[in-house]
Image: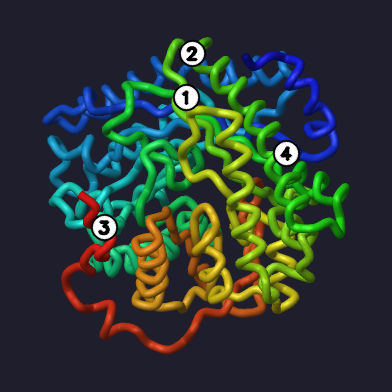
Amino acid sequence: MINILEVAETNKMIEKENLDVRTITMGISLLDCMDSDTQKTCENIYDKIVSLAGELVNTGDEIGKEFGIPIVNKRVSVTPVAIVGEACAKTTDDYVKIAKALDRAAASIGVNFIGGYSALVSKGSTRADDLLMRSIPEALSQTEYICSSVNVGSTKTGINMDAVRLMGNIIKETALKTADRDSIGCAKLVVLCNAPDDNPFMAGAFHGVSENDSVINVGVSGPGVVKNALESVRGSDFKTLCETIKKTAFKITRVGQLVAQEAAKRLNTEFGIIDLSLAPTPAIGDSVADILKEIGLEHPGAPGTTAALALLNDQVKKGGVMASSYVGGLSGAFIPVSEDQGMIDAVEAGALTIEKLEAMTCVCSVGLDMIAVPGDTSADTIAGVIADESAIGMINQKTTAVRIIPVAGKGLGDTVEFGGLLGYAPIMPVNSFGCSDFINRAGRIPAPIHSFKN
């Protein structure tokens, strides 16, 4: 049984070490909102979201006050919109109308973000998928709360290189469409391989078609807690290091389990999963990079970084699965550049490059996340980066993602400021050698041999 005494044990973590419940995300199925008329579909979507999630923000605030646990974000994820709009959408404008309906619903209920403006095209794409992908730049430029994701590959199906190539162009167009806000549209757009159906974190959250009508998924985060715990065993051997991380992750996850169950109960919906991910923020003392430094690195990017991150990720998962029977989402450690002050410092010190970050993504929760690059980076180069990350995910049977921001009008030496949780980032150099002949081949990269396990 989970009780309030376990929460009391975490008071120090909350007050001094930045422990929080990073997000309560309500997943909502929109399959019953489909209609042959776009306007009717939009009305159905708005009504269902407001009906089910109307009390999400208030409930989160109430639980936070009662238990003394900061609940930073309240969010909604929905069925991939490419599916929802298939019966009515004839043009990209129809999908933009649906995006605006989602945005109105998000504003009405007061959530931070709404995810699921998504298409799942790991093997191929329908007409509706193609329309949604092509509508993304306009949708993100005309909305405030929408987050978009496209799954272009999986271990079972391979990598849809036609979609990878298209998304390189979509990211460039999104950057230009939101150039007046430092290309912030790209900060709300992620391209994934092996995307999970129950991820509570943005921008990759959507509500999978195999999920219940509505669920509560919770993401708990505590990089500062882990760092402070490791300070108490500084210089100890690897066994002590691992045990400390594991025990700390256990305590963090128990807090999330309590919040998730209570939120589901009060909102009269199902409890879905706890996501164990250590998700940093720009706040001092809330950094995954600082954990890596405490483990023994001068800066993330130094030799040994990938091994240290692998150790951290594994022990977080081991501690978390002992604390909850329903672990899902991404679960591990995020390494976003703009959202982690320690990562920003490592980039500015010259210790961390995109190539090293790519190596780290083999063992972290996701992939290349919140990386700002020169605005003149070509669409083919961006597509090549997406292809590389997708290959890592496909071969290693894990989720990988790319959230890259070619900031219009900015180059090396510049810094881009997104504000809030999205933070700020130095513009990072990208390998300038071409890959166009590779990217412009049609078709898909087939699934790896180890995918055939039936």
- The reply to whether dot 1 and dot 3 touch (C-beta < 8 Å) is no
What distance separates the C-alpha of mark 4 from that of mark 3?
A: 35 Å
Say if 109 sits above or below 418 in the image.
above
Q: Position of residue 367 (x, y in %)?
A: 49, 60
Q: Nearer the viewer, mark 1 or mark 3?
A: 3
Q: Is residue 52 left or right of residue 319?
A: left
Instruction: Tell me, for residue 216, which label it has, or none.
Output: 1
Task: First in sequence, mark 3 or 2: give its number.
Answer: 2
Say if 68 sits above or below 360 in the image.
above
Disc 1 marks a residue whose amino acid type is Ile
What distance separates the C-alpha of mark 3 from that of mark 2?
A: 39 Å
| The one of 45 and 287 positioned closer to us in this rendering | 287
Disc 4 marks a residue whose amino acid type is Thr
Q: Nearer the viewer, mark 4 or mark 1?
A: 4
What distance separates the C-alpha of mark 2 from that of mark 1?
A: 9 Å
The quarter of the displayed image where residue 21 is located: top right
User: In percent of the image, x 72 and y 60: which residue is there?
Assistant: 292
Task: First in sequence, mark 4 or 3: give its number.
Answer: 4
Q: Nearer the viewer, mark 3 or mark 2?
A: 3
- The reply to whether dot 2 and dot 1 touch (C-beta < 8 Å) is yes
Q: Secondary structure at mark 2?
A: loop
The quarter of the displayed image where residue 61 is located: top right
Q: Which residue is mark 3?
A: 451
